[in-house]
Amino acid sequence: MAMIHAALALAFLFILTATSLAAAPAGAQQSPANEEAVGIEAANSVGRLRVIALTPTVLRVRFAPGGEFAEDASWAVPANVRAQRAAITRRSNGFSTSALQVAVDPRTLALSVTDRQGKLIHADTGVPITLEAGGFTLRKAMPAGERYFGMGDKTGPHDRRGASFVNWNTDAYGYGAATDPIYKSIPFFVAAGGQGGAYGLFLDNSHRSWFDFGHRQENVLALGSPGGPIDYYLIAGPTVAEVVRRYTDLTGKAPLPPRWALGFQQSRYSYMSDAEVREIAARLRSDRVPTDVLWLDIDYQDRNRPFTVNRQTFPDMRRLARDMRADGLKLVAITDLHIAHAPGEGYAPYDSGRAGDHFLKNPDGSTYVAPVWPGPSVFPDFTRAVTRRWWGDLYKGLVDDGIAGFWNDMNEPAIFETPTKTMPLDTVHRIDADDFRPRPAPHAELHNVYGMENSRATFEGLQGLRPNLRPFVLTRATYAGGQRYAATWTGDNNATWDHLKLMVQQLVNLGLSGFTYAGADIGGFTGGPSPELLTRWYQLGAFTPVFRSHAAKNTPRAEPWVDGPEHLAIRRRAIEERYRLMPYLYGVAEQHARTGDPVMRPVFYDYPGALAAPCDTSMTFTVGRELMVAASPRPESPQAYDVCLPVGGWYDYWTGERVRGQPIEGNTAVERIVETPRLERLPLFVRAGTILPRQPVTQSTAEKPRGPLSLDIYPGPDCRGELYWDDGETLGYRRGAFLRQPIRCAVGESGLQISFAPRTGSLKPWWRELAVTVHDWGGAAEVRTNGRSVTAEEDGPARALRFTLPDPRRGTEVVISRR
Ligand code: GLC
């Protein structure tokens, strides 16, 4: 293979500015007259490197082999985001922004980025760019002690150092902890622990790219692709949280989902009939398992044909949906992308798709046909805007029937009876969307974005059909930016303890990769869990963003009640707690929509010192900033284990008591406690300084809670909280129909002061009163608000103080003094 080393050729270097291209140094090459770039360009006989500052902390790096840049278009980063430019100052061999210094070595074209103090954030190493027959390799330095996270749903441990991955969306039925590639391609990682702080790298290339984190060559982070543009973004922190927020500024944030999607969801492949769906619903209700959603897998359809209903087994879908809704339950139905190849059979999706020329083609121009669930099938070309619109309209019937959400599965796309599990690489798409130049393109280029564009078509179709309701779509395959359209899950996992662990690792890394709404099949899809494993899975799943129980055909049942009343009681308790926490959880979801902060986070997201915690943190994560789950890193073992709690103080969620950690020698960022596993206990901690809103348990999010909103105050530093609420379903919140109220508390010598800021938004809440509990409070107290005294009850054994306030709509101060 002919290799050209960019570094060997003579390089030219010049600065690009929006205002004055004449600022380029004498002798430098001129850039095109219409060049809008602000940054630096360096060129040699191999190609041209261009680095542009979109914002003071986000750089876009492109390399043009032979000097000609690939078209400026992207499936992940919208054109208006790519068009941003930050102000820069020229420097020798580079430029600086208000946050970064960027330098390109004129000899090797090696890039290095430091902060303004000169601390290294990111640097190329060795031969920075190598070109190989249409593809390329980039080489980056891996400083000792730096750790790597993200890369979507990829398996293996949290930290990617030492591992190597390929991005190629794959139907990975029965995958294990070392299988790669699997369902999704999110070519983005966050590097943490380096000298200049955390940074992120997103390679915006939809081909079969690969990332090698020092696996092949120690301390060299190599990445590349066999095709497509050299086009990547460097995102500086210095914190991990800032990197993730900025990555979601580029690729988008998941919008606020309907609140019911945060409830418990019960699924199975498949509930076979109307009668079975009703039976499951009745059992969930009689066992008092709070539930919001029942799922319809492929067997509700006629011969597995998408957008049909088997009228023998589901004679009246509209009535079923209505009856379920009356019981507080929504239906979500699967609608796979493969359309049955059924010419002349009156199957409308085939007929209209054929008439509109919406299907992918073979290179000879004939329609590509291959087997999936319905038998011979055809495949919509979701890379065309017109095809996406046609697809979106197919939902009308099911939407009119009252189906609330939709599931896009098999969209890697999965193909049966072929060793590659997918379609031939030369299958022809006809790109015609966004700012792409309309052109035919091979599947090799579009494979990794196919699932995302499928879910986009569904999302946009639902927006058109129900303009005032928030769509809910679940997709299996996706690409960077797919979080704008759909939630996701980790596919066909197994009923093993390993997979319980893998769930945490995958969901945490998905959250860091922009995909906050992710879940795993509770109980495992294949195999069948032991009672203990299933109980643990429900407990832990209750704290994951998408909480859905699902299992394959011919596996044992895995609904909450299957192992008898004792297991049911523990599982129900976990599910109930999720519903109690809904005001908090929903607030975290709203925060994600604004900031990109994941719902489920590694502890070091909010507590950077925890990155170097000397505990096994593989089963530890936070939900928002305030709640920390610390399950056993050997979940099948009865042995005690250490939990590292960031310094600052924590409370035991279940008892409300303050936790006393032991200092760890040589580490001032965390303290240690010891947990001994007990099946009925999921170790859960609340940060000292939290004001935690909760509600009475309901059987679904559709039910109005009875009683006051409870507010638990866990005194400590930086004591604050926020109430956020809206109708949970419509877009009314975008027009002011929401409620937001920041709350602060201050701990002083004589007691505690709670300040409720005035509310914003026009929403009237369901609560009239607040039931306040102050934890870690010994002794008698006097409570006053607005000059009036409030009766408070001392709970000696729990070391808590309790009182009730009228809903402080306009804001108020509450003063609690020791007596
Ligand atoms: C795939 C999905 C699984 C689903 C099944 C039938 O295996 O991953 O969740 O139940 O197809 O639709």
Image (cartoon, rainbow, N blue to C red):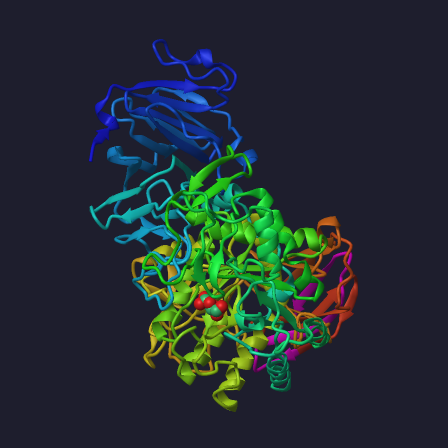
**Hey, which residue is sitting farthest bottom in the picture?**
565
Q: Which residues are magenta?
A: 794-819
Report the magenta stretch's main SS: strand
Residue 545 image offset from top left, x and y in percent: 52, 63
Residue 638, compared with residue 73, is above or below; it is below
**Hey, which residue is sitting farthest top in the picture?**
26
Residue 755 image offset from top left, x and y in percent: 68, 57
Taking the image as shown, residue 677 lies to the left or right of residue 293, namely left
Q: Quadrant of the N terminus?
A: top left
Residue 649 visible in image: yes
- Residue nearer the viewer, 68 or 116: 68
Residue 400, compared with residue 20, is above or below; it is below
Taking the image as shown, residue 671 lies to the left or right of residue 626, namely left
Residue 679 image offset from top left, x and y in percent: 43, 82
- The residue located at (29%, 37%) in the rendering is 136
- The residue located at (41%, 83%) in the rendering is 532
- The residue located at (72%, 61%) in the rendering is 727
- Residue nearer the viewer, 778 or 693: 693
Q: How many marks?
A: 0
Q: Is-magenta flag for residue 805? A: yes
Q: Is-magenta flag for residue 808? A: yes
Taking the image as shown, residue 285 lies to the left or right of residue 129, namely right
- Residue nearer the viewer, 235 or 242: 235
Taking the image as shown, residue 317 lies to the left or right of residue 52, namely right
Residue 413 image offset from top left, x and y in percent: 44, 56
Residue 459 visible in image: no
Q: Quadrant of residue 604?
A: bottom left
- The residue located at (46%, 47%) in the rendering is 366
